[in-house]
Image (spheres, rainbow, N blue to C red):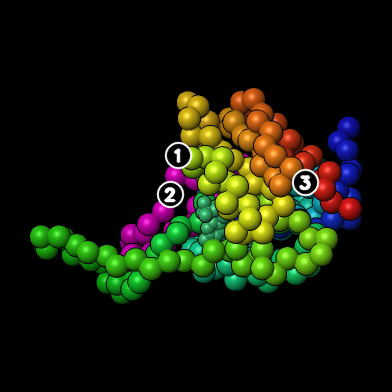
Amino acid sequence: EAQHDLAGKQIMITAGPTYEKIDPVRFIGNYSSGKMGFALAEECAARGAKVTLISGPVTLNTRNANITRIDVENCEQMYNAAIEEFDRCDAAILCAAVADFRPENIADKKIKREKDDLIIRLCPTQDIAAELGRRKREGQRLVGFALETDDENANAESKLKRKNLDFIVLNSLRNKGTCFGTDENQITIISADGAKAYPKKSKDEVACDIVSCLSDIMS
Ligand code: C5P
């Protein structure tokens, strides 16, 4: 039987990629499947929380009736939904692989091929995690993810501070068969207290470990 250690809690989760439009038929995106975020949403709901799942474009379904889903396409929409929700939440888990840059202008017609090259100027998107970190009130908890290709722990630690997170989940790209699109993940959880490395597990089991960590620091 599932523990109900999150009964009465409101938790927001961001998941999936964002798509930043180039023209009516093209976008800049990434390989995030949303599986980790959706597993986190199911785990929180199974433990009694009410969950708002803000998801970028994915091909996944939610099962638990205590998950309210908000589907978005781009960073701006995800940002607006997250800002709107966060105020009434006890915690947020920011699992989305948000685009860091978007095309400065969206072409209103399909860009034609008859050119020697194509330069698309990009500008930065809003950092949802950093903004929620600024807005975080006493007692609210904020969890982020980090996917690094080098200096993993140092980069994750600097994000922890910069975005005012309670802990950060470092996703390893070094192990084969983990991370993007797969059903397994190998994580390290980094907080002000230090780092804890977990073995490679299914995303459902990883979700359980992450939610247990969160539950431990919620009052
Ligand atoms: O800086 P970086 O993108 O690596 O930080 C990753 C963390 O910040 C993740 O938790 C991710 O969901 C969050 N993030 C965000 N908005 C962005 C970029 C990242 O919420 N624009």
Indicate which quadrant contains ligand 1.
Answer: bottom right
Query: Between marks 2 and 3, how big is the CA–CA gap?
Result: 27 Å
Q: Residue at x 33, y 73 (%)?
A: 105
Q: Which residues are magenta?
A: 15-37
159 horizontally vs 49: left or right = left
Q: Amino acid at mark 1?
A: Asp
Residue 214 disc label? 3
Q: Amino acid at mark 3?
A: Leu
Q: Position of residue 159 (x, y in %)?
A: 58, 53
Dot 3: within a 10 Å radius of its alpha carbon, few (fewer than 14), some, or many (20 or more) residues? many
Q: Quadrant of residue 2?
A: top right
Q: Secondary structure at mark 1?
A: loop
Dot 2: within a 10 Å radius of its alpha carbon, few (fewer than 14), some, or many (20 or more) residues? some
Q: Position of residue 98 (x, y in %)?
A: 51, 56
Q: Considering depth in this image, is 190 or 12 the residue closer to the camera?
A: 190
Residue 161 disc label? none
Q: Residue at x 63, y 52 (%)?
A: 160
Q: Which circle's residue, 3 or 1, is located before the other in the chain? A: 1
> Which label sits in the foreground, 2 or 1?
1
Residue 30 disc label? 2
Q: Secondary structure at mark 3?
A: helix
Q: Secondary structure at mark 2?
A: loop
Return the residue at label 1: 150
Query: Between marks 2 and 1, how big is the CA–CA gap?
Result: 19 Å
Q: Are marks 2 and 1 in contact (CB under 8 Å)?
A: no
Q: Is residue 91 visible?
A: yes
103 horizontally vs 90: left or right = left
Q: Position of residue 38 (x, y in %)?
A: 64, 45
Q: Residue at x 48, y 40 (%)?
A: 151
